[in-house]
Amino acid sequence: MTDAIPAERMPTAMRVAMFVLTLDVAFSLLGLAITIGTIAFAFSGPFLLLLLYSAAITAFMCWLLARWTSRRKLVRWGAIAVEGVSVGGSLLKNAIDGGVGWTTLVAALLIPLVLVIMLLTPSAARWFDR
C-alpha cells in the first residue's frame, strides 16, 4: 500500500474567511436575481450595466471560492481585489441611488470589509504561501 501524506489543516481564520466568502457569494447571487427581475420588469441601459457588473463580481467570487484550497497567493490577492471593487461599486451605486439601509451596510460593506481584514492577517499570508 502507499503511504498517505497528511495534508496541512486549514487554519480556523481561513475557514471562517472561506465561510464569509461563501456568504458574500450567496448575497451576490441574491442581488443578481433581484437585478435580473428588475431588468425583466423595466429594461433600461443603466440596469443592464448593473447586471453586467454584478454578474462579473459574482463570477470572480465563485471562481475564487472554488480555488480557495489551492493556497496560491493569486487567490488571496484576487479575493482582496474583488472585495475592494465590490465595496467601491456598492458605494458608488448607493451614492447614485441615495438609499442606504441596514441590508446595504451588512451585505455590501461589512461582509467584504471583514473578509479583506481577515485576508490581510499573518495567518492568511502563511496559508496562501504557495
Image (cartoon, rainbow, N blue to C red):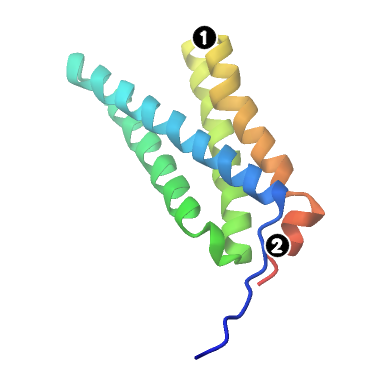
Q: Tell me the element at label 1.
A: loop
Name the residue furthest right. Answer: 122
Q: Tell me the element at label 2.
A: helix
| Residue at the image point whose x is 49% and y is 22% from the top | 93
| Residue at the image point whose x is 71% and y is 47% from the top | 13
Residue 126 lies in quadrant:
bottom right
Viewer-proximal residue, 67 or 48?
A: 67
Q: Position of residue 86 (x, y in %)?
A: 53, 35
Marking on residue 6 = none
Instruction: Kindly identify the amino acid type of the residue bearing the numbered disc 2.
Output: Trp
Q: Is residue 85 above or below residue 95?
A: below
Instruction: Tell me: 71 left or right of 41.
Output: right
Residue identifier under label 1: 98
Residue identifier under label 2: 127
Residue 29 lies in quadrant:
top left
Q: Is residue 97 above or below residue 44?
A: above
- Which quadrant is home to the C terminus? bottom right
Instruction: Kindly identify the amino acid type of the residue bearing the numbered disc 1.
Output: Gly
Viewer-proximal residue, 94 or 27?
A: 27
